Amino acid sequence: MSTTFHMSLPCLSIKATKIFYIHNIGATLGRNTENWVDINLFGNQLTFIKAEKFNFNSPNYVFEGKILPSFHFGIVLDINVWEAIYAKLRNKNLHLVEENNFLKDKSGEHNSFFIKDPNDYMLEFKCFKNPENMFT
């Protein structure tokens, strides 16, 4: 059985959220109203619900000398899709954190970059050198 995740998050603007995920990331639009939207992010369901201003106290952490956001969510892609989306997003005027390689020459080695969406969420894109080592 194939599984997907569903995540529901508050957002400030349905319009800005749709523009970011559909036009910039390349996700597809699902069911939606004026107050909520489903986004198909590589087969996973993100639901954004219009809400008042919210605040997540998001302390950062250090991993292999890099400061990373502790509050984030993301998607693991194969290398070809990852490279294409990274190249596409690098050329846009978006809050993009440059690519990093983590756990070099170790189990779990992966490339990663972060991008901030219009709701101030940090979205991570990862690709593993050996996908079978994702959990080892």
Image (cartoon, rainbow, N blue to C red):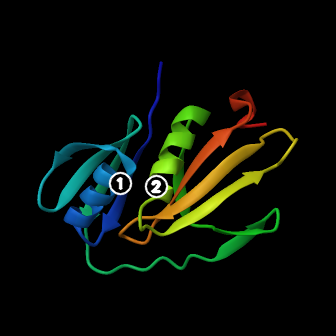
Q: Residue type at mark 1: give it.
A: Asn
Asked whether 12 or 102 is in front, the reply is 102
Q: Determine the image quadrant of residue 110.
A: top right
Q: Determine the image quadrant of residue 66.
A: bottom right
Q: Tell me residue 76's x, y (percent).
A: 57, 41
Pick the quarter of the image with the C terminus: top right
72 w.r.t. 130: above or below:
below
- Give the CA separation, mark 2 to mark 1: 7 Å
Which residue is label 2 attached to?
Answer: 89
Which residue is label 1 attached to?
Answer: 24
Q: Residue at x 22, y 53 (%)?
A: 37
Q: Residue at x 46, y 58 (%)?
A: 91
6 w.r.t. 64: above or below:
above
Residue 78 shows up from this direction: no
Q: Are marks 2 and 1 in contact (CB under 8 Å)?
A: yes
Q: Quick one: which residue is furthest to the left in this view? A: 34
Q: Residues within 10 Å of mark 1 (few under 14, many from 20)?
A: some
Q: Quick one: which residue is furthest to the right in this view? A: 105
Q: Tell me residue 7's x, y (percent).
A: 40, 50
Q: Residue at x 74, y 51 (%)?
A: 101
Q: Tell me residue 112's x, y (percent).
A: 64, 52
Residue 47 numbered mark, or none: none
Badge 2 marks a residue whose secondary structure is helix
Q: Tell me residue 53's x, y (percent).
A: 31, 81
Q: Residue at x 75, y 33 (%)?
A: 133
Q: Residues within 10 Å of mark 2 (few under 14, many from 20)?
A: some
Q: Determine the image quadrant of residue 12.
A: bottom left
